[in-house]
Image (cartoon, grey):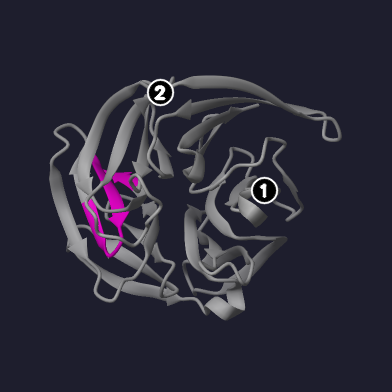
């Protein structure tokens, strides 16, 4: 059972107050995916080794109050997740795997040749989704009915602040935040048209970016690892202005998820997941 800690974070300059609940007991949590009644959390394993095929990765299914409900095991380093037609899909280094939500049995596997660092998943309808490869700069489309994939676009890491990390489909565009694993250059927020693949740089927010989510008003949330593991979440408005969410610094601020007024934040280095509500 996870330990829950409740904290109130305040920022006087913004006159905002946020409630933060912290759930402990994970093993390098990388990504969160929330559904109506429960939440999935992918875990790399005891050590932060995102590229090692060590078979100690797993996915926790928990209630929104932090109670463990189930567990999917025998993964290597699971990261981004998405649900399509009753199947939970997850990226696992170089392979997309799918698990039936009811039986937990693996029902899908698709290896992507040449993939190095498959990362986030952004679903698009019933037939497929996008998946990023931070290591090669590629974003792929996955066709579930054909059990196939093709390259959607390749980003120049030096030009855009690293490879594609977090993904989000919104209003006919694919939103991408970039991350340089060597942390030599800072990533940014990109908007890529699904029609003509035109790339637009959005906002002046910069950082070692990981996840991206959106709320009901069109505000983006972007997680960034920060310097010296002082991770932050940026809130970026539709007019491209941005500010840091007024909560504590997070060690390993990874792939976030927003749903119904709640922002879920994995703190990978702390082995915690934060539930943030306003």
Mark 2 highlights which residue?
Answer: 2
Which residue is pictured at 84% across the width and 30% down the height? 12
Identify the residue at horizontal 68%, vertical 35% (top origin): 247
| Left or right of 112 in this view: 13 | right
User: In the rendered view of the protein, which quadrant contains the N terminus?
Assistant: top left
Task: Please name the residue that numbered disc 1 is placed on.
Answer: 234
Q: Nearer the viewer, residue 112 or 49?
A: 49
**Which span is picked out in magenta?**
82-97
**Left or right, residue 19 beside residue 153:** right
> How many marks can you see?
2
Q: Can residue 110 be seen by looking at this rendering? A: yes
Mark 1 neighbour density, 10 Å: few (under 14) some (14–19) many (20 or more): many
Q: Nearer the viewer, mark 2 or mark 1?
A: 2
The image shows residue 190 at horizontal and vertical percentages of 59, 65
For the residues bearing labels 2 and 1, Cβ distance under 8 angstroms: no
Q: CA distance from mark 2 to mark 1?
A: 27 Å
Magenta highlight: main SS: strand
Position of residue 51 relative to residue 170, above or below, is below
- Whether residue 182 appears in magenta in the rendering, the answer is no
């Amino acid at each position: 059972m996870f330990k829950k800690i409740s904290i109130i974070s305040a920022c006087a300059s913004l006159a905002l107050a946020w409630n933060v609940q912290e759930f402990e007991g994970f093993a390098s949590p990388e990504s969160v995916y929330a559904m109506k009644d429960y939440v999935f959390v992918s875990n790399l394993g005891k050590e932060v080794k995102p590229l090692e095929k060590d078979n100690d990765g797993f996915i926790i299914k928990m209630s929104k109050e932090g109670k463990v409900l189930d567990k999917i095991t025998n993964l290597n380093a699971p990261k981004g997740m998405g649900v399509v037609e009753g199947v939970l899909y997850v990226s696992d280094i170089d392979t997309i795997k799918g698990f039936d939500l009811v039986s937990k049995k693996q029902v899908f596997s698709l290896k992507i040749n040449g993939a190095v660092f498959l990362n986030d998943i952004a679903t698009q309808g019933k037939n497929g989704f996008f998946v990023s490869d931070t290591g090669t700069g590629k974003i792929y489309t996955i066709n579930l009915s054909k059990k196939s994939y093709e390259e959607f676009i390749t980003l120049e890491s030096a030009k855009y602040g690293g490879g594609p990390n977090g993904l989000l489909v919104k209003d006919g565009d694919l939103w991408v935040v970039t991350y340089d694993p060597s942390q030599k250059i800072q990533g940014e927020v990109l908007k890529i048209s699904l029609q003509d693949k035109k790339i637009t740089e959005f906002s002046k927010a910069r950082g070692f970016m990981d996840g991206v989510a959106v709320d009901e008003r069109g505000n983006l949330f972007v997680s960034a690892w920060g310097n010296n593991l002082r991770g932050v979440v940026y809130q970026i408005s539709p007019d491209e202005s941005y500010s840091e969410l007024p909560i504590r610094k997070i060690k390993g601020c990874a792939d976030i998820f927003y749903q119904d007024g709640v922002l879920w934040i994995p703190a990978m280095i702390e082995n915690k997941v934060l539930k943030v509500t306003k």
